[in-house]
Image: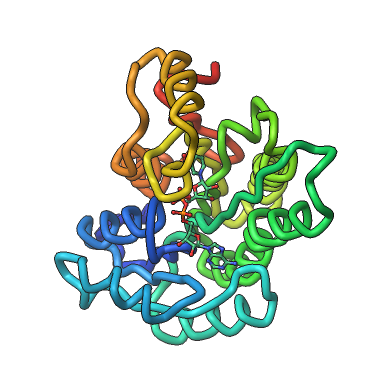
C-alpha cells in the first residue's frame, strides 16, 4: 500500500459534473485505475446511466447535487463521507458556458457562470477540506481553462470564473499545504465534448491553426494529467496550473 495516495490506498476520488463529457471520462478512467469514485451531478438518472458504461460499475457511487447550491453540496459530501473509507481526491470539473459579447452579456448570464464554475468549486472545496485536513492527506484538482489565462472574446464571464479558479487554487494550496493536502488546477485547451460541439466551423478551423500539435484534445488527454495530479509522483506539487492544450497557450 502506498503511503502517498494513489489508487492503491482505496481512497475515493470525487468527480463533479460526471454524467457526460470530461467529467464522465475522468470518473470512468479513474475507476478503471482502481479508485473508488463518487460521481456527482444534477441528475441521478444520468449519472447512473454513465456509471453503467464503466468496466467495473461496483467501484462507482452516484450522488445528486447542483454544485451551485450550498445545501446540495453539503448533503452530497456528507453522504460521500459516510460511504467512503477515506477521501483521496476531489476533481472540481462541473462547469458551464453562457457566451455573449460583454455589452450584451446579461447580468443573469454573468451570475450563472460565476455561480456554477467558481462558487460551485468553492462550495465543494469548503465542504471537503475539513476531512482532508483531518486525514492529513488529499488532492484537490480544479478544472480551469486556457480561457482563464488568455481570455476570449464573448466569454468574459467564463474567463473570469476560470481565472478565479486559478487564484483560488493558489490560496487553497497555501492554506491546506501544512496538512499534506495539495490543490492544483488543470487548464485544458479545446477538448472535443458536447460543450465545444456547437462551435461554428470557422471558429474550429481558426482554433486548429493555433494549436502547435495540430489536433483538438480528447478527454483521454486530460485523464493523464488528472491521474498524475492524484498520484504519488505529484506529492510535492501544489498551487500549480498545468496547461493541457496541445501548445495553444504558452
Ligand atoms: P460538458 O458540458 O460536456 O459537461 C459539464 C458537466 O457539468 C455536465 O455533466 C453537467 O451536467 C455538469 N454541470 C453543469 N452545471 C452543473 C451544476 N450546477 N451542478 C452539477 N453539475 C453541473 O462540458 P465539458 O466539456 O465536459 O467540460 C467539463 C469542464 O471542463 C468544465 O469545467 C469546462 O469549463 C472545462 N473545460 C472544457 C473545455 C473543452 O474544450 N471542452 C476546455 C477547457 C475547460
Relative side of 184 to 121, left or right: left
- What residue lies at 20% left-to-right and 67% top-to-bottom? 53
Residue 13 against residue 243 in the figure, above or below: below
Position of residue 105 in the picture relative to residue 179 (left or right): right
Residue 133 in the image, given as x and y percentages of width and height: 59, 65
Residue 174 visible in the snapshot:
no
Question: Quarter holding the C terminus?
Answer: top right
Query: Is residue 206 shown above or below 39?
Result: above
* Vertical position of residue 132 compared to residue 64: above or below: above
- The x and y percentages for residue 22 are 39, 51
Image quadrant in which the N terminus is located:
bottom left
Name above or below for residue 100 compared with residue 70: above
Tell me the residue at 41%/56% (across/down). 23
Is residue 140 something one can see in this rendering? yes
Q: Nearer the viewer, residue 37 or 62?
A: 62
- In terms of depth relative to the viewer, which is nearer, 238 or 127? 127
User: Residue 20, percent across and down?
Assistant: 38, 60
Asked which colour scheme the image uses, the reply is: rainbow
The residue shown at (34%, 78%) is: 61
Foreground of the two, 57 or 174:
57
Amino acid at each position: 500500500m502506498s503511503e502517498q495516495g494513489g489508487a492503491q490506498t482505496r481512497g475515493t476520488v470525487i468527480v463533479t459534473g460526471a454524467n457526460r463529457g470530461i467529467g464522465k471520462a475522468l470518473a470512468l478512467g479513474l475507476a478503471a485505475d482502481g479508485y473508488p469514485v463518487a460521481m456527482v451531478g444534477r441528475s441521478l438518472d444520468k449519472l447512473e446511466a454513465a456509471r453503467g458504461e464503466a468496466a467495473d460499475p461496483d467501484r462507482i457511487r452516484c450522488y445528486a447535487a447542483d454544485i451551485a447550491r450550498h445545501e446540495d453540496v453539503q448533503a452530497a459530501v456528507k453522504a460521500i463521507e459516510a460511504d467512503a473509507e477515506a477521501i483521496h481526491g476531489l476533481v472540481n470539473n462541473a462547469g458551464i458556458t453562457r457566451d455573449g459579447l460583454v455589452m450584451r452579456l446579461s447580468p443573469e448570464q454573468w451570475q450563472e457562470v460565476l455561480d456554477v464554475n467558481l462558487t460551485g468549486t468553492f462550495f465543494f472545496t469548503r465542504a471537503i477540506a475539513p476531512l482532508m485536513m483531518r486525514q492529513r492527506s488529499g488532492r484537490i484538482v480544479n478544472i480551469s481553462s486556457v480561457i482563464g489565462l488568455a481570455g476570449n472574446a464573448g466569454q468574459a464571464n467564463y474567463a473570469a470564473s476560470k481565472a478565479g479558479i486559478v487564484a483560488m487554487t493558489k490560496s487553497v494550496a497555501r492554506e491546506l499545504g501544512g496538512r499534506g493536502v495539495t490543490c492544483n488546477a488543470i487548464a485544458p485547451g479545446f477538448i472535443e465534448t458536447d460543450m465545444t460541439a456547437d462551435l461554428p466551423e470557422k471558429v474550429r478551423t481558426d482554433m486548429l491553426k493555433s494549436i502547435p500539435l495540430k489536433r483538438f484534445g480528447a478527454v483521454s488527454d486530460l485523464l493523464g494529467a488528472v491521474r498524475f495530479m492524484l498520484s504519488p509522483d505529484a506529492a510535492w506539487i501544489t498551487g500549480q496550473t498545468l496547461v493541457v492544450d496541445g501548445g495553444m497557450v504558452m
